[in-house]
Image (cartoon, rainbow, N blue to C red):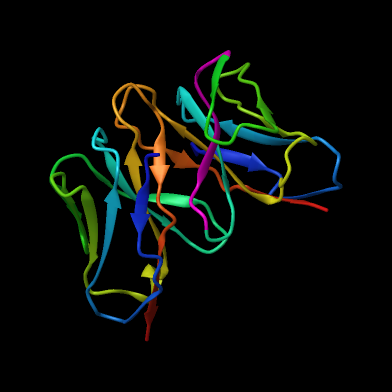
Amino acid sequence: RKEVEQDPGPFNVPEGATVAFNCTYSNSASQSFFWYRQDCRKEPKLLMSVYSSGNEDGRFTAQLNRASQYISLLIRDSKLSDSATYLCVAHSGAGSYQLTFGKGTKLSVIP
Amino acid sequence: DGGITQSPKYLFRKEGQNVTLSCEQNLNHDAMYWYRQDPGQGLRLIYYSQIVNDFQKGDIAEGYSVSREKKESFPLTVTSAQKNPTAFYLCASSIRQSNYEQYFGPGTRLTVT
């Protein structure tokens, strides 16, 4: 069974802190990876896509290690508004449109 | 504004009744998907459709049915055969020949008693 594993947390960090989440995936055929953000009782929203070794967007950096089959998400200078659950997602491989979702890591940024 | 709409936001039904959840998109996306999310669980794929008049079962299709008569619409019927229908249902869409990014509607929270 193809799976994506994440530490459920919660990660409680003070404003301004740097926090990192790791995620491992079991399907070595996965080529594309994503981080989604999900607020409580809302839909997931795409935060970042990762197709090569990594991606950076402002305070957010994602890194991919294919040899070890893990993806990380780094959030710098945490804001209160970053509080959410972060979902790690792997594409199922060539010829498929399916994504495999992790259960999410909960982040609470505290003042 | 382009986007995905799901209605209703909250739905209550009695056990034994079929119920249909609506999903419409005006993003001109080819592929559409239905997921369910239970508390503390990851999203699980129910059905997906890559093109009009074609759809495939996902990981948990039993007790559900879909249709894809129009590119914009992908309704999901939760039948009385679904053992645990109470859940948060999410519809998503993606451009078919792309980087597989999926975009979600706001979801329908179904409660069956």
Residue B26 x %, y % = 52, 30
Q: Quadrant of residue A99?
A: top left
Query: Going by the picture, which residue comes out furthest to the bottom?
Result: A111
The quadrant the C terminus of chain A occupies is bottom left
Apparent side of residue B43 relative to residue B15 in the rendered image (left or right):
left
Q: Nearer the viewer, residue A12 or A68?
A: A68
Residue B46 x %, y % = 57, 35
Magenta span has B42? yes
Magenta span has A49? no
Query: Going by the picture, which residue comes out furthest to the top?
Result: B53
The quadrant the N terminus of chain A occupies is top left
Name which residue lies at 59% across and 54% down: B38
Name which residue lies at 28% across and 74% down: A78
Q: Quadrant of residue B75?
A: top right
Range shown magenta: B41-53
Q: Nearer the viewer, residue B110 or B1?
A: B110
Residue A100 x %, y % = 40, 41
Q: Is residue A111 above or below residue B6?
A: below
Apparent side of residue A6 relative to residue B72 in the rendered image (left or right):
left
Q: Is residue B106 above or below residue B62?
A: below
* Magenta part, dominant SS: strand
Apparent side of residue B45 relative to residue A45 in the rendered image (left or right):
right
